[in-house]
Image: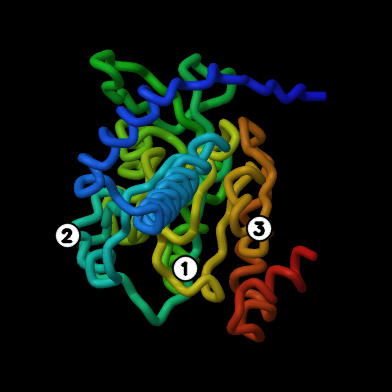
């Protein structure tokens, strides 16, 4: 229990009291009245509280592991790609607003890459320069990926959203889509948000109605912000008998997607 300390001051003499009274009277004109002092104190307190609220608003996401993102521009800026460097248009065509959008992960979803030469046959090699050093990656394409991209690209707008570095991932995409006719846009690691040390892909960056968007990823952390939009897929490494893309194509070209305008309802019916 806190103890209250009563501090007793020595009694002043009459001469001292008269001197102090005269001294205070000479400064009355420059001292604020008690009422003014109360108002000023109240204003300062309000400003202090407001200042603390603003600090909490902007500092709380950082303390929880979120990355504070730059302010996004308007829709025109996103479509024209003039002021938002995180969007990378690949096809050179305008984004088809009439098509639904499929957001595909890259590594372990479309391909598997390794810096060690794999025991199974690999499809191609990329040599990105990262931090001034040229690295070698051996890449194995998931079975059926070429046919899948071609067929799905006729009906859907394809976007690749990867947590991989642009220096590496852009070279892989150039191999998968050398003529740049299938993959409309790409997003790399710099477009990911960090939550509790994990990279998360916010579909808000795609700037599409989320009712018309499906994200396909082998890592549940990637779609943690919009799990209802996710089509989970098994991670691919080197299984040349893998049939996951056939299952995905069955869903995207099936009755569920045709029956529902909201892809989240189609996912709920097909995936459960």
Tell me the SS state at disc 2: loop
Nearer to us in this view, 194 or 44: 44
Residue at the disc numbered 1: 101
Q: Dividing the picture into quarters, in which one does residue 190 lie?
A: top left
Residue at the disc numbered 3: 227
What residue do we see at 56% from left, 64% from top? 214
Label drawn at residue 109: none
Q: 10 Å neighbourhood of mark 1: few (<14), some, or many (≥20)?
A: many
Horizontal arrangement in the rendering, residue 255 relative to residue 94 (left or right): right
Q: Is residue 211 above or below residue 121?
A: below
Q: Nearer the viewer, mark 1 or mark 3?
A: 3
Tell me the SS state at disc 1: strand
Label drawn at residue 82: 2
Q: Tell me residue 224's x, y (percent).
A: 63, 50
Horizontal arrangement in the rendering, residue 42 relative to residue 270 (left or right): left
- N-term-proximal mark, 2 vs 1: 2
Q: Tell me residue 83's x, y (percent).
A: 19, 57
Q: Are marks 1 and 3 in contact (CB under 8 Å)?
A: no
Q: Nearer the viewer, mark 2 or mark 1?
A: 2
Nearer to us in this view, 256 or 36: 36
Q: 10 Å neighbourhood of mark 2: few (<14), some, or many (≥20)?
A: few
User: Residues under labels 1 and 3: Cα distance?
Assistant: 16 Å
Q: Is residue 115 above or below residue 218?
A: above
Looking at the image, can residue 205 be seen? yes
Q: Tell me residue 204's x, y (percent).
A: 45, 61
Q: Is residue 160 above or below residue 113?
A: below
């Amino acid at each position: 229990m806190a103890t209250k300390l009563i501090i007793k001051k020595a009694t002043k003499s009459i001469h001292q009291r008269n001197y102090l009274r005269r001294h205070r009277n000479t400064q009355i004109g420059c001292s604020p009245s008690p009422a003014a002092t109360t108002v000023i104190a109240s204003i300062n307190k309000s400003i202090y509280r407001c200042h603390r609220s603003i600090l909490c608003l902007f500092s709380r996401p950082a303390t929880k592991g979120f990355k504070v993102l730059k302010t996004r521009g308007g829709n025109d800026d996103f479509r024209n790609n003039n002021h938002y460097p995180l969007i990378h248009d690949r096809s050179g065509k305008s984004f088809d607003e009439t098509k639904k959008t499929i957001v595909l992960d890259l590594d372990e979803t479309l391909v598997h890459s390794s810096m060690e030469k794999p025991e199974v046959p690999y499809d191609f090699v990329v040599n990105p320069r990262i931090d001034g050093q040229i690295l070698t990656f051996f890449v194995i394409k998931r079975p059926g990926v070429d046919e899948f991209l071609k067929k799905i690209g006729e009906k859907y707008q394809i976007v690749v959203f990867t947590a991989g570095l642009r220096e590496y991932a852009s070279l892989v995409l150039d191999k998968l889509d050398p003529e740049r006719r299938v993959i409309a846009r790409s997003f790399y690691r710099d477009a990911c948000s960090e939550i509790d040390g994990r990279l998360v892909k916010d579909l808000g960056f795609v700037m599409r109605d989320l009712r018309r968007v499906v994200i396909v990823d082998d890592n549940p952390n990637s779609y943690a912000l919009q799990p209802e939009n996710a089509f989970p897929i098994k991670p691919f490494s080197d299984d040349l008998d893998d049939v996951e893309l056939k299952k995905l194509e069955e869903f995207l070209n099936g009755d569920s997607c045709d029956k529902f305008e909201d892809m989240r309802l189609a996912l709920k019916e097909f995936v459960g």
